Image: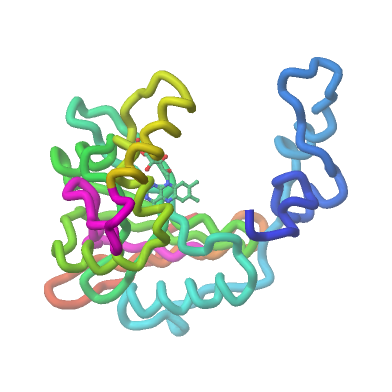
Amino acid sequence: MSDNSLLSTGGFPAGDQYRGAMTQPIDPTDPTDSTEPLLEAALRTHTDYGAEKLDEADLASDPFAQFTAWLAEAAERGVYEPNAMVLGTIDPDGAPSIRTVLLRGVDERGFAFYTDYTSRKGRALQANPGVAAVFPWYTLHRQVKIFGTAQRVAPEDSEDYFAHRPRGAQLAAWSSDQSQPIASREALEQKVVDTERRFADADPVPRPERWGGFRIVPERVEFWQGRTSRLHDRLLFHREGAGWRVERLQP
Ligand SMILES: Cc1cc2nc3c(=O)[nH]c(=O)nc-3n(C[C@H](O)[C@H](O)[C@H](O)COP(=O)(O)O)c2cc1C
């Protein structure tokens, strides 16, 4: 973990409801480790949002400009992993599935992230390109929701991105058939040893063909700003022809 402030609070972000409540990680195998007050705090705290607002007049003319402004602000205001989004997909059998991924590029074409094309999400997106994602910037009382379809990025973009990853991450991409079961941690580490041996003389490590990027091409993007008494601001961009139409939603 790179952020020491997280270590000092036992892994919880230092939000108001957790501050000072916990200094040691809870041991789930220890029945005497009382979690009662923490559970109470986690389940019952009621935070009233409201210091900031989102007006139509303050909105950029397209969702990409609005998103990049909010992302930069999230980084500036100390959101941990501000480029992390929770991504929802539909499996080939119709079942929904979610996970966190990191945004690695945004422009007028859409929102790009990188993964294993043979993973659960990779297979899902190839069967059903429909996708939804949320950036949960809780400490700012903001979220951005994206709805659209995913398509693979150009192979050159995947090459370029892979080439700039740390060598350890490159070897891990070769060593992990993402989302597939494995017998043990030791078996996984043995795969890494085998990969290191295989690519001992390779610099750079080549990109596995099954690893690359997807770009979410949005149809709708919602900007959500928490307000007092749950009367939040929700402004939704809809794609319309070559431009965007904005609609306000009830909270
Ligand atoms: C903060 C965070 C960032 C992550 N970023 C990525 C990512 O960019 N790409 C990726 O494939 N998995 C990423 N993961 C792991 C995924 O959440 C997930 O476990 C993995 O992709 C397998 O998902 P799947 O089985 O649904 O395909 C990240 C997890 C966390 C907690």
The front one of 54 and 202 is: 202
Q: Quadrant of ligand 1?
A: top left
**Which region of the structure is painted magenta?**
199-224
Q: Residue at x 22, y 38 (%)?
A: 118
* In the foreground, 82 or 240: 82
Quarter-wise, where is residue 221 in the image? Answer: bottom left
Q: Is residue 110 left or right of residue 87?
A: left
Vertical placement of residue 120 versus 114, above or below: above
The spot of residue 37 in percent (x, y) is 84, 32
In the rendered image, residue 198, in percent from the top left (x then y), is placed at 28, 44
Asked whether residue 212 is drawn in magenta, I would say: yes
Task: Please give the name of the residue rendered at 74% of the width and 51% of the height, measured from the top-left corner.
Answer: 7
Relative to 70, residue 4 above or below: above
Which one is nearer the viewer's eye here, 88 or 224? Answer: 88
| Farthest-out residue, front | 201
Asked whether 56 or 85 is in front, the reply is 85
| Residue at the image point whose x is 60% and y is 57% from the top | 138
Q: Magenta includes 38?
A: no
Name which quarter of the figure residue 193 lies in: top left
